[in-house]
C-alpha cells in the first residue's frame, strides 16, 4: 500500500511538472502564433490597401479623361463661336 501511495505521489509530481512544462511551452509558442497571425493580418491589410489604391487611381484616371474630353469640347465650341463672331463682324 505504501509503495502504491509513493507511485501515485510520484505520478502526481510528474503530472505537475509536465503541466508546468506545457505552460512554458504555450508561453513560447503563443508569441510565435501571435506573430504569424499578425503577419497574415498585415498581409491582408496591405492587399486591401493596394486594391483600394488601384480603385482610387482608376477612378481619378476616369475623371481626368472625362474632364479632358469636356475641355476639348468647350474649346471646340469656343473656337466655333469665335469664327462665327469674326464672320458676322466681317459681314457688317
Image (cartoon, grey):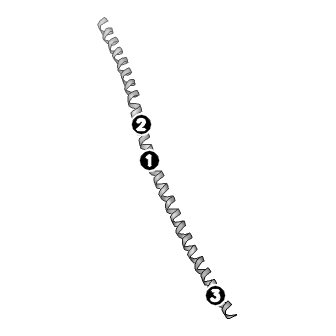
Q: Is residue 91 left or right of residue 24?
A: right
In terms of sequence position, does the residue under pointer 2 or pointer 3 come before the other? Answer: 2
The residue tagged 1 is 44
> Residue at horizontal 67%, vertical 94%?
91
Residue 57 sits above or below residue 32 on the image: below
Rounded to the nearest angstrom, the CA distance separating label 2 from label 1 is 14 Å
| Of the pair 41 and 3, the residue shown nearer to us | 41
> Residue at horizontal 39%, vertical 34%?
32
In the rendered image, the quadrant that contains the C terminus is: bottom right
> Residue at horizontal 54%, vertical 71%?
68
Q: Is residue 84 left or right of residue 34?
A: right
Where, by quadrant of the figure, is residue 9 drawn?
Answer: top left
Of tags 2 and 3, the one toward the viewer is 3
Q: Position of residue 60 (x, y in %)?
A: 53, 62
Residue found at the far front of this picture = 90
Please tell me how crowded label 3 is: few (under 14), some (14-19), or many (20+) other residues with Cα within 10 Å. few
> Residue at horizontal 64%, vertical 90%?
87
Of tags 3 and 1, the one toward the viewer is 3
Residue found at the far bottom of this picture = 91
* SS category of the residue bearing label 2: helix
In the rendered image, the quadrant that contains the N terminus is: top left
* SS category of the residue bearing label 1: helix
The residue tagged 2 is 35
| Of the pair 24 and 69, the residue shown nearer to us | 69
Q: Is residue 49 left or right of residue 18?
A: right
In terms of sequence position, does the residue under pointer 2 or pointer 1 come before the other? Answer: 2
The residue tagged 3 is 84
Q: State how many labels appear.
A: 3
Q: Position of residue 90 (x, y in %)?
A: 66, 92
Q: Position of residue 6 (x, y in %)?
A: 32, 8
* SS category of the residue bearing label 3: helix
| Of the pair 52 and 60, the residue shown nearer to us | 60
Amino acid at each position: 500500500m505504501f509503495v502504491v501511495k509513493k507511485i501515485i505521489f510520484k505520478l502526481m509530481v510528474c503530472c505537475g511538472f509536465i503541466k508546468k512544462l506545457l505552460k512554458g511551452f504555450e508561453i513560447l509558442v503563443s508569441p510565435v502564433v501571435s506573430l504569424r497571425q499578425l503577419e497574415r493580418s498585415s498581409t491582408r491589410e496591405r492587399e486591401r490597401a493596394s486594391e483600394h489604391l488601384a480603385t482610387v487611381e482608376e477612378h481619378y484616371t476616369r475623371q481626368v479623361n472625362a474632364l479632358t474630353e469636356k475641355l476639348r469640347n468647350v474649346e471646340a465650341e469656343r473656337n466655333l463661336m469665335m469664327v462665327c463672331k469674326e464672320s458676322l463682324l466681317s459681314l457688317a
